[in-house]
Structures are given as C-alpha cells and as structure tokens.
Image (cartoon, grey):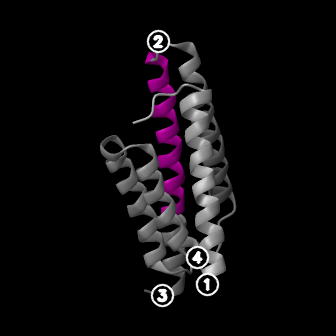
Amino acid sequence: MNRSTARSQGQLGSLIVSAMFVLAGAVTLYDTLSYTDRDSRVFPQTVAIILIVCASISFIMRFIKPTGEGGFGQGIWWRRVLLISTMVLTCLVMPIVGFLPAGIIAFAGGLIAAMHDRWTLPNILIYWGAGGIIMLVFYTLFKFVLNVPLP
C-alpha cells in the first residue's frame, strides 16, 4: 500500500469514527429522555452533548481540511490493546467484584499502558500511592457524600 492510499484510508477512518461518536452521543441523549428522575439526566445529557459537539467539530475539520496523518499514526500497538481490554474487563467485572477492585484493575492497566519511563521503586510507590488515594477519595465521594449506590 502506498503512502497516499494509507493517508486516504486514515482520513476515511477518522471521518467514520467521528460520525460514530456523533451517533453514540445522539443515542445516549435520546436514551436520557426515558429517565424518570430529572436529576439523573443531567450528567449523561451533558456528556452526550459535549461528545456530539466535539465529534462534529472533528468531523467538520477533517472533512474541510484533511491532514496527512490519519488512523492510528505512530505508536506501540500493545499499549492501545491493553488500555481498551482493561476498560472492557473493568466494565465486565465491576458488577461482580465491586467498585474498588474494578477500579484497581482499571488503574493498573491504564498505568502499565501509559508508563513510558523505566520502573523504579520511587515511581512505583508514588504512582500506586497516588492511585490508591484517588480511588478511595472517589469511592468516599460517590458512596458517602453523593449517596450513589455502588456495586
């Protein structure tokens, strides 16, 4: 495959992904209309509207002014696969094991995927300590302050 074919396929792929995100936002926005509690609509509607606006801007910009880069670009493929599979795994196990253990899975997979530096003991202690504190703060916030029922 020559370079211009790869660029046009990347361009097409970017347009398709942007359109899919606009569609996902529209479906989410439509789904929130069935929520009986008005307060429970606010967050999903806000996120759906932001998703539609940002994906529409991306689509329009890519359509009007195509760029040379498209698709995945440069990078390490296993990091992307690890991050996506970690998020899917977290969603699947959260109802079974609960919020905190699923959060640990998500944090560990994301950290491993994002860590480009060499692993040293100080790095491990700082990152895992900060992650633990963040997870506990979120758990406390949702469970006890906002009274959100968590699995």
Spatial CA span between label 2 and label 4: 43 Å
Q: Nearer the viewer, mark 4 or mark 3?
A: 4
| Residue 49 shown left or right of residue 112 in the figure | right
Spatial CA span between label 2 and label 3: 54 Å
Is 82 in front, or is 106? 106
Q: Nearer the viewer, mark 2 or mark 4?
A: 4
Q: Where is residue 66 in the image (x, y as percent from the top left)?
A: 65, 66
Is 42 in front, or is 74? 42
For the residue labelled by badge 3, is the local secondary structure a helix, a strand or a loop? loop
For the residue labelled by badge 1, is the local secondary structure a helix, a strand or a loop? loop
Is 134 in front, or is 12? 134
To which quarter of the image does residue 121 belong? bottom right
> What stretch of residues is rendered in magenta?
13-34
* Amino acid at circle 4: Met
Q: Are marks 2 and 4 in contact (CB under 8 Å)?
A: no
Q: Position of residue 92 (x, y in %)?
A: 32, 49
Examine the rendered structure and indicate whether residue 31 appears above or below residue 34.
Answer: below
Q: Mark 2 points at which residue?
A: 36
Q: Mark 4 points at which residue?
A: 115
Spatial CA span between label 4 and label 3: 33 Å
Earlier-in-chain disc, 1 versus 4: 4
For the residue labelled by badge 4, is the local secondary structure a helix, a strand or a loop? loop
Q: Mark 3 points at which residue?
A: 2
Q: Residue 120 carries which label?
A: 1
Q: Nearer the viewer, mark 3 or mark 1?
A: 1
Position of the N terminus by quadrant = bottom left
